[in-house]
Amino acid sequence: MSREPQRATLAAVAREAGVSVPTVSKVVNGRTDVASETRARIEALLVRHGYVARGQGGAQPVSRTVEVVFDTMRSPNNLDILHGALEAAAAEPVEIVVGTVPEDPLGAAWARRMSAAHREGLILVTSEINTQQWRQFAEQNIPVVTIDPINLPGPDVPSVGATNFNGGMAATAHLLDLGHRRIGFIEGPPGAMVAIARLHGYHAALSQRGLTGDPALMMAGPFTFETGFSAALELLAREPRPTALFASNDGQALGAIEAARTLGLRVPEDVSVVGFDDINAARWSAPPLTTVRQPFAEMGRVAMRRLLRLIAGDELASPRVELATQLIIRKSTAPA
Amino acid sequence: MSREPQRATLAAVAREAGVSVPTVSKVVNGRTDVASETRARIEALLVRHGYVARGQGGAQPVSRTVEVVFDTMRSPNNLDILHGALEAAAAEPVEIVVGTVPEDPLGAAWARRMSAAHREGLILVTSEINTQQWRQFAEQNIPVVTIDPINLPGPDVPSVGATNFNGGMAATAHLLDLGHRRIGFIEGPPGAMVAIARLHGYHAALSQRGLTGDPALMMAGPFTFETGFSAALELLAREPRPTALFASNDGQALGAIEAARTLGLRVPEDVSVVGFDDINAARWSAPPLTTVRQPFAEMGRVAMRRLLRLIAGDELASPRVELATQLIIRKSTAPA
DNA sequence: CTCGGGTGCGAAAACGTTGCGATACTGAAT
DNA sequence: ATTCAGTATCGCAACGTTTTCGCACCCGAG
């Protein structure tokens, strides 16, 4: 076994600075008989070694942690969310424990475990939260902030999301402006709030121009490439063929582009495609995908900041915050 | 392993920790007269032995944590690595604190902070580690496992990677088998070990057939789409034009495809393109990218399992482990 | 009584502080 | 140029303080 772990000590600093222990001590105590150049060098090393005076070591720098829980580790969006959350947490500083939704999210064990581990709060990403869980965390005094909750949480549950409705409207309006009238819509998984909001944005943009969506131009499924592919195959077989497709996320949209290619249709000449999220692959696809950008990193930042405020005991003026989405027009859309 | 018939006892923990029974007792009872380093060591052993106080049967869930530190939160590979690490950690169970490389990674403060926070180990992803840091963590008795370290770490530093050399060879051999002879190579950032290994695999495959790489067909740069784009623009302007490009990662490869398109060249009819990593976007690109798959999730799993073994006090038979890469042939390569 | 565990206390080590002297350097007087 | 007093800088050694940990002893259950 190697030797004991050692904490910051004057001797270590002295050795590295090439001076004696007393000299370092004099720097710490603000004595004057140290050359300013030596003093500067030692002070830098003191910081680097994280030296703390022995007496006041009692104020234990107990590390603070919050937990960030994802429903899945597969969505690339989650990395950006985590990135933003990390940035915001670094300012406090608070550390982040990552996890996935536990096996039995309904039991009280989850909240108790977090309490026992001294987690100060929880950010729940694209997951479900029901009133029972919410109460359990409240009982343990653990604030919870959700990001894009799957279900519609209670009105008290703080949540951070994006303007999915506006984004859906903007994308649809963009297609309408280009002259498209038959716009196929690939819905997200049934019940997911973000998907529902996008769908309603689609409808809202249509009805704003006195149009109504054709139920025959709707397909639903999970947020996957495969869903987009198969849904687009069906939608593009409708007569008359839709001239544009709006997919509920980028994975679906890229699948739709692939489906169009399979059918011998050119994007955007024969059919325009719009996605949602603006993942990396959207920028790199052929053609580059017109899509609605979600500010994932910013959502992570905001969620963390709100959680930290809740931990500090502040009240949130509004439990729900929606960050602006932005329509990014690339090459997958063209006039009808 | 020796027999462990008895319930965990203070004496056993004390013996293994090299302290007296009373000292362990003091840790259990939260006395203050125990050095924090000693306390951390004993606490870890208590958890590992599954010690439960005599009176209360209920096992108190003391949370154990390890830290996973990334150099950047932008690489999509990192999410898969984290995913695998989480799976392996869940089995123990151990929780994962994520972080990024601190401002001053050279100072001893990092190791000391981790020790103070009772982190039991560290996984360092695509980062640099030098002898000094390695010693500092060793001094704190914090095992470190690296994943794809940027530099060539000391021979003692445990590291997990992929067979980058073999992958580079396999991809190049694939192109050679298709009849390509002028194969442009887009290198990774200078100094990165993974990039160097891929480059050498390329050279090895060439020389195996008695060929040598043309220095005029080499371009280097970061692992980005933009690097791939601009490098490919230059490479494809060479005379005679290379019939294939091998990029050191998928981002570069997708940039190269875009560059080919810009020049009016068809992929794969006019130029074949191979990437490295097999990110999602590779499957979804047009055409789908032939690439060398790295088992990122598996790398995360293996790294975590090795770290947990080091924490348990086991020795690793071999500090370096390379997991197999796999050539995924899609549609971006064709006969010359 | 034995075994597992808890605790007061003392000793030793670790850590930091301080007085003082050694050394080098400066600048002015010789 | 040399000397020499003055000063800045820093280490030595001794000292004071706190931390740490085991010994010895205690308790309670079986």
Image (cartoon, coloured by chain):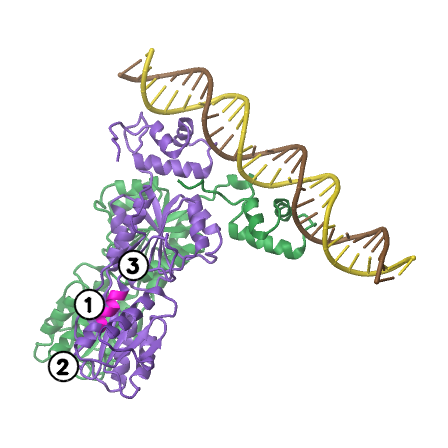
Chain colours: A green, B purple, C yellow, D brown
Residue B169 colored in magenta in the image:
yes
Distance from the alpha carbon under mark 2 to that under mark 3? 42 Å
Q: Point out the residue furthest to the front here.
A: B210
**Looking at the image, can residue A203 be seen?**
no
Observer-nearest of B207 and A165: B207
Circles 3 and 1 on the same chain? yes
Q: Chain of mark 1?
A: B
Q: Position of residue D25 (x, y in %)?
A: 45, 15
Label 3 element class: strand
Can you identify the residue that label 2 sits on? A265
Q: Which part of the image, by quadrant, shows the N terminus of chain A?
A: top left
Q: Amino acid at mark 2?
A: Leu
Q: Is residue B323 above or below residue A251?
A: above
Q: Is residue B252 above or below residue B297?
A: below
Marker count (numbered): 3
Mark 3 burial class by Cα count in 10 Å: few <14, some 14-19, many 20+: many
Q: Which mark is residue B327?
A: 1
**Looking at the image, can residue A165 be seen?**
yes
Mark 2 burial class by Cα count in 10 Å: few <14, some 14-19, many 20+: some
Contact? badges 1 and 2 (CB < 8 Å): no
Residue A333 colored in magenta in the image:
no
Q: Chain of mark 3?
A: B
Q: Which mark is residue B161?
A: 3
State the predominant SS element of the stretch in magenta: helix
Q: Amino acid at mark 3?
A: Gly
Mark 1 burial class by Cα count in 10 Å: few <14, some 14-19, many 20+: many
